[in-house]
Image (cartoon, rainbow, N blue to C red):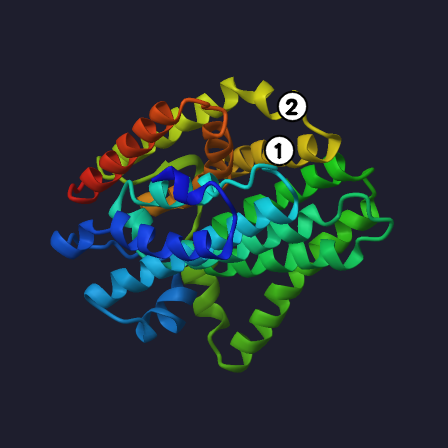
Amino acid sequence: MLELYKRNTFFSLLLLLPYALGLHLGPGFVVLPIETSDHNWMYNSMIQPWLPSGLYEWAFASGFIFVQAVAIAKLISDFRLNPAGELFPSLFFMLFCGTHQQTLAFGAIHLANFFFVLSLFQLFRCYQKKRAVQQLFNFGFLIGVASLFYPPYCAFLFLGLAGLFVLRAYKTREWLQMLGGFCSVYLLAFAALYVANLHVEFFNKQIAAHFSPYIFSMEISSKGWIAFGIIVFAVLVSLLHYGFFQVKRNIAQQKYYDLFFWCLLAAFLSILFQRIDNPGHLVLIITPLSVLCGLLLTRVKNPLVAETTHLFLVAISLFLQFQNW
């Protein structure tokens, strides 16, 4: 099966859609309750009422995951992170999303994650530019939109700061430009909500409700811990193979790969002083992790080993979709 995704062609990208629909069959047979967080007021009040229900909801969710997978493939292609052109990072994104029904379901987190993936394009384009005002502002703006739907995404401002050091010579003026893009989202949103007399409700149910005085406030009980364990194991494997992303790489690739590791750190920071009550929060880690694991799979030269690894991950993903762990 991996042979179909060894080239980044239009036909291969189209094949990602049936892959996503086939990989995410679990909800079509076993419908488990989807937890909705009261902390996502913006999404619950403005987006959720317009969404389809039942099986159409899961088809829509798989389609949206497919869109993000295509965006990740374009990111890899545009910045030549994988010269061979395999679509393995996109496959891993869909595989990791399928490890739990909460990470598979469409919600505020996936909507925010879409804007986060778009922000990576802007950040990476800052490299070797004399003036990157537009890109830095756009990165901050897109992170602001993402955090508007799911506030923990504000932790990726730290990624922007790291990007200024990794991709450019740090300048305070450029950091302020990035913050300006981020703050402009909230200024516009607050102005619109103030006119509608919803600004107090937005602050109480969306902003204040998400933040916690405690450093760790994860309230997902036993649900999601199996998926969490799989993700942590994949993170450890990626860290142990850090040298793979540095040896025999050009300078640009090394810098871009480093930023994906900074993404993992920013995703970890997103659980600090935040109320996490949904396993879907793992999507923040899944995005950079899928890129790293997908590139690691290209290291496997034996086709039989690669196919066996892939089928094993597919079996785990499908099995976990029928559970409520």
Horizontal side, residue 49 vs residue 272: left or right = left
Q: Is the C-beta separation of discs 2 and 1 under 8 Å?
A: yes
Please tell me whether residue 38 is drawn above or below residue 319 in the rendered image.
below
Q: Quadrant of the N terminus?
A: top left
Residue type marked 1: Tyr
Q: Report the residue that reaches farthest toward the right.
A: 130
Amino acid under disc 2:
Gln
Quarter of the image with the C terminus is top left
Residue at (33% x, 28% y) in the render: 309
Is 31 displayed left or right of 140 in the figure? left
Q: Give x and y (percent) for residue 9.
A: 51, 52
- What residue is at 58 percent from the left and 36 percent from the top? 260
Residue drawn 72% across the image and 50% down it:
125
Farthest residue, direction left: 29
Residue 79, image x, y percentages: 66, 44
In what element is the residue under mark 2? loop
Between the residue at mark 2 and the residue at mark 1, the CA separation in whole angstroms equals 8 Å
Q: Which residue is mark 2?
A: 246
Label 1, on which residue?
A: 257
Instruction: Identify the image quadrant of residue 106.
Output: bottom left
Percent of width and height locating residue 57: 26, 65
